[in-house]
């Protein structure tokens, strides 16, 4: 383990008393060190978070971007920016490497997300996933849960890449992604490779599902108890977890995109991953919340489920057959999130441009 003093609190209690793994939702090194002190054993990242980390630490990253540009005089803004992201990821992965070794590959991983501009090209996604996999022993690579993404997930898994499925908001996406990972693992085993140290996870962006349903309720003028809207992502997470356990999937489900404390407290106890942003970790750990160690198996109130069932898009997200694979890419949260990730890539390009070609 890194030489870090652990910080008592609800997060550490949950980490030490249950199978629930805490990962930090950022590869920022200062945040990651503190998350490890809270009991954290991994980290996730995405284009928005990577851009935010670089833009908020320009005292560190502007000189490094200038050096990358100087070392590679023919590179454009995108290649330079992605090299900065890869450098940041390797440094965060090094911080987690002792945890990775201790957990035999199950935890201690740093997530790197594939370029969202490849979202229409399964081979490009799988090829880049393999490139990122080779950055460090303990990298886990994010690929979106779309029809194209599922093809890339199976392919990359068969090449030995541990996948973190992203742009995923629903039970059908999570289950189909877990099945794609299983097919990839089976192909790799059939080729004579050991998969025991691989560590795939399947994300449900619980808060982004809540965000979308709140938008739908306002847009479509659906009358509903507003408190139910805080439970949609939790309900999807609990249902997906039960299916994963029942079917023995080797990937773990991961809760991300936090909007309320329920998205941590209601899943504690499961053999799964929670990935709250650092600000949520500090709020939780400074609280007097008494950890209930098996909330994951407590069902969501039937009243809340009845209220949520008035929203067609909740049923699409909650029922295993609520969407076909072909429908994943057109699901509202998928489109919205892909657009945000694409915009973050463009923001990073602009930031790099301002550094290497400053305004006169």
Image (cartoon, helix red, strand yellow):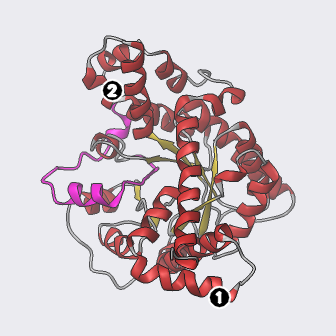
- As helix, strand or loop, the secondary structure at mark 2 comes to helix
- Choose top left, top right, bottom left or bottom right for residue 230: top left
Instruction: Please give the name of the residue rendered at 36% of the width and 56% of the height, measured from the top-left corner.
Output: 277
Residue 206, position as x, y percentages in the image: 43, 39
Count of numbered badges drawn on the protein = 2
Earlier sequence position, callout 2 versus callout 1: 1
Residue 60, position as x, y percentages in the image: 43, 82
Q: Disc 2 designates what residue? A: 229
Q: Residues within 10 Å of mark 2 (few under 14, many from 20)?
A: many
- Determine if residue 71 is in view: yes
Q: Is residue 32 left or right of residue 315?
A: left
Residue nearest the viewer, comparing 176 with 48: 48
- As helix, strand or loop, the secondary structure at mark 1 comes to helix
Instruction: Please give the name of the residue rendered at 60% of the width and 63% of the height, measured from the top-left corner.
Output: 140
Mark 2–mark 1 distance (CA, rounded to whole Å): 50 Å
- Choose top left, top right, bottom left or bottom right for residue 111: bottom right
Q: Residues within 10 Å of mark 1 (few under 14, many from 20)?
A: few
Instruction: Please give the name of the residue rendered at 32% of the width and 62% of the height, measured from the top-left corner.
Output: 16
Residue 73 sits inside the magenta stretch? no
Q: Is residue 297 left or right of residue 334?
A: left
- Determine if residue 46 is in view: no
The N terminus: image quadrant: bottom left
Q: Is residue 258 left or right of residue 131?
A: left
Callout in the foreground (2, 1): 1
Q: Is residue 122 above or below residue 233?
A: below
Residue nearest the viewer, comparing 201 with 297: 201
Q: Disc 1 designates what residue? A: 70
Residue 281 sits inside the magenta stretch? yes
Q: Is residue 215 above or below residue 245?
A: above
The residue stretch that appears in magenta: 270-298
Residue 165, position as x, y percentages in the image: 60, 49
């Amino acid at each position: 383990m890194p030489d870090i003093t652990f910080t008592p609190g609800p997060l550490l209690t949950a980490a030490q008393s249950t199978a629930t793994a805490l990962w930090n939702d950022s590869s920022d090194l200062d945040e990651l060190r503190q998350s490890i002190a809270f009991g954290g054993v991994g980290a996730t990242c995405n284009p928005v978070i990577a851009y935010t980390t670089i833009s908020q630490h320009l005292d560190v990253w502007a000189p490094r971007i200038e050096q990358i540009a100087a070392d590679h005089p023919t590179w454009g803004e995108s290649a330079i920016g992605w090299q900065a992201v890869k450098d940041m990821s390797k440094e965060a992965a090094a911080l987690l490497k002792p945890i990775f070794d201790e957990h035999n590959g199950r935890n201690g991983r740093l997530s790197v997300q594939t370029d969202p501009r490849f979202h229409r090209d399964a081979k490009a996604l799988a090829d880049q996933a393999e490139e990122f996999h080779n950055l460090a022993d303990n990298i886990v690579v994010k690929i979106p849960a779309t029809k194209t993404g599922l093809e890339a997930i199976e392919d990359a898994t068969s090449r030995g890449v541990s996948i973190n499925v992203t742009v995923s908001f629903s039970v059908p996406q999570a289950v189909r992604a877990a099945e794609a990972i299983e097919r990839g693992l089976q192909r790799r085993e059939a080729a004579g490779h050991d998969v025991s140290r691989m560590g795939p996870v399947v994300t449900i962006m619980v808060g982004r599902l809540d965000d979308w349903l709140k938008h739908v309720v306002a847009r479509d003028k659906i009358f509903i108890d507003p408190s139910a809207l805080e439970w949609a992502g939790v309900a999807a997470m609990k249902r997906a977890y039960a299916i994963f356990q029942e079917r023995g999937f080797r990937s773990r489900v991961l809760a991300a995109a936090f909007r309320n404390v329920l998205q941590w407290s209601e899943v504690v106890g499961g053999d799964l991953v929670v990935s709250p942003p650092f600000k949520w970790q500090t709020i939780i750990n400074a609280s007097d919340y008494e950890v209930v160690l098996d909330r994951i198996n407590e069902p969501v109130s039937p009243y809340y489920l009845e209220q949520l069932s008035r929203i067609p898009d909740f049923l699409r997200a909650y029922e295993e057959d609520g969407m076909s694979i072909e429908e994943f890419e057109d699901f509202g949260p998928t489109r919205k999130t892909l657009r945000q990730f694409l915009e973050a890539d463009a923001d990073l390009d602009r930031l790099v441009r301002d550094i290497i070609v400053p305004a006169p």
